[in-house]
Image: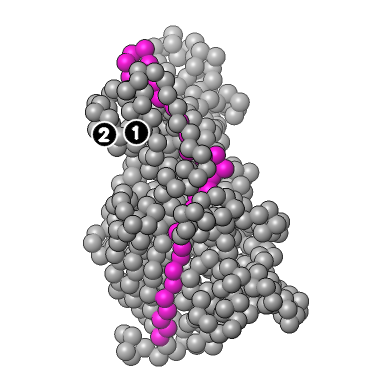
Amino acid sequence: IFEKAPNVVEDDFYVQRQPHMTIEPDVGFAYIDDNGVLKIHSKTIGAHLHLLMIAPGLGLEPDQIALVSNPMGGTFGYKFCPTMEGLVGAAALATGKPCFLRYNYFQHMTYTGKRSPFFVNIKFAADEEGKLLAMETDYIVDHGPYSEFGDLLTLRGAQFMGAGYDIPNIRGRGQTVCTNHVWGSPFRAYGSPQSLYSSELLMDELAEKIGMDPWEIRYKNCYRPGSTNPSGQEPEVFSYPEMLEAIKPRYEEAKERAKRESTDKIKKGVGLSMAVYGCGIDGPDSSEAWAVLNPDDTVTIVAAWEDHGQGADMGMVGTAHEALRPMGITPDKIRFTWPDTSKTPNSGPSGGSRQQVLTGSAIRIACSEMLKSLRKPDGTYMSYAEAVSADKPLKYVGKYTVPGVPCDEKGQGRPFVVYMYGVFLAEVSVNTETGKVAVDKMTLMADIGKVNNRLVTDGQLYGGIAQGIGLALSEDFEDIEKHSSLVGGGFPYAKDIPDNIEIVYFENYPREFGPFGAAGVGELPLSSPHAAIGNAIYHACGVRVHHLPATPEKILAGLRGERV
């Protein structure tokens, strides 16, 4: 195909080792309770998963240990891996006393994992009209010294390079490489920032070669009925055409504004990127939640939905409120639990944008069982006293498993049955004297299915976009001394994040396998904002940044004609 295709482009890209840079460092404590059970409180976002991972190392059976996930603020994915749980647990066992462990910030930065870099070679073939014919990839994942989750991360490259587009022929090779660099751990959008930066910048290169507008080539190739994604499955919804049509007037206005406002010193540019991420852990992912009727006629949702800033509290309350509408229960009458493996069911980890889909669906089922059981012949519902009098259960169990199919060795399957989709528009200014890039505005067209809580999802999208700006321009972790602080790691300053961020929701595409049509949200905003910024930099000043971050030094080198 590549030998015969009229339009072929090929390039190499590198997305860097990104530090998570949470405000709070890693911290936790452990003690032996009155029943002789080792209780470990930490920032774990996979309580049941981590219990099974660390129990053998501590020489304990699973019922001799319990993990508790306290309200913790952000982790952005690093706590998908156990970090200090085993250490503080061993200290408590050795001393017989309560113990705590709090890393200082240097320890936090050096003892916890980072986003693993991808070295990517990628090639597109297209016909005379710009329709994609084929994609070929060859990429290496530098996962550091440990294999933990490295195979799954490498699979993400096969799932997300070229995602968003109908590509009939795909061939590729991904390799996980162990190195003596910092160890790799999950990071928000896990694998898609590395994948989509490569395919989205190459898409602009293809458009330029053909003489097409970047918007036009995306509109021509985006998912439509009959398309398949890189995993060989047909997308569950087709929102891209509508989102691209909605962003086009903003894109055209932005191009005119950039042309009008550019000077010899300050060059303005505009860039687009497609965004996509799956909701879940590959294949038949599952969750469990309970709904319990209390003596005061409130309802408690019992689940292990770990909250690391993404809104587990409102996710549980909002989903249960929707499910219990027939009972007329107001949100203030709905309670929820924090994860404790000795008291809560296994709801799975808070990663992969899975909880709203998986645990939300388990909550929906548990509440539905409650409604069926407590409904009276006149259509009203029993109170607690009436339920006890009628010998009705007070606890209702919801279990949910999505009909996913794990990918085979060729990356083909149905790894996720619910995805999130988006389109980013970045507007930037490049100072040609200093090389400094400023992001003037970011726009995101977001399809996350039906929105549970608008304030929570707004916060997720704003925050992810801010992280994407840091990934694009400043964040890095190559030098263990230089980068082991917030400032050294490239944490963006407030002035680096524009106040002008526009989010537009598309809720006309409810998800069959999400509760009340909802998808997830957490990973979408960090999947490809940096790619839109990279394309905007090129539009502004002709410098294509192949090796992130796009520091001033690289921009100046690019303006001198060097490859950066």
| Amino acid bearing label 1 | Gly
**Viewer-side residue, 116 vs 511:** 116
Q: Which residues are magenta?
A: 8-37
Is residue 68 placed above or below 293 in the rendered structure? Answer: below
Of all residues shown, which one is farthest toward the top?
Answer: 389
Is residue 550 placed above or below 206 in the rendered structure? Answer: above
Q: Earlier in the sequence, mark 1 or mark 2?
A: 2
| Residue under the image location 42 percent in, 76 percent down | 12
Of all residues shown, which one is farthest toward the front?
Answer: 481
Disc tally is 2
Q: Position of residue 22 (x, y in %)?
A: 54, 45
Q: Are marks 1 and 2 in contact (CB under 8 Å)?
A: yes
Residue indicated by mark 2: 57
| Residue under the image location 52 percent in, 56 percent down | 482
| Residue under the image location 39 percent in, 68 percent down | 119
Quadrant occupied by the N terminus? bottom left
Residue indicated by mark 1: 86
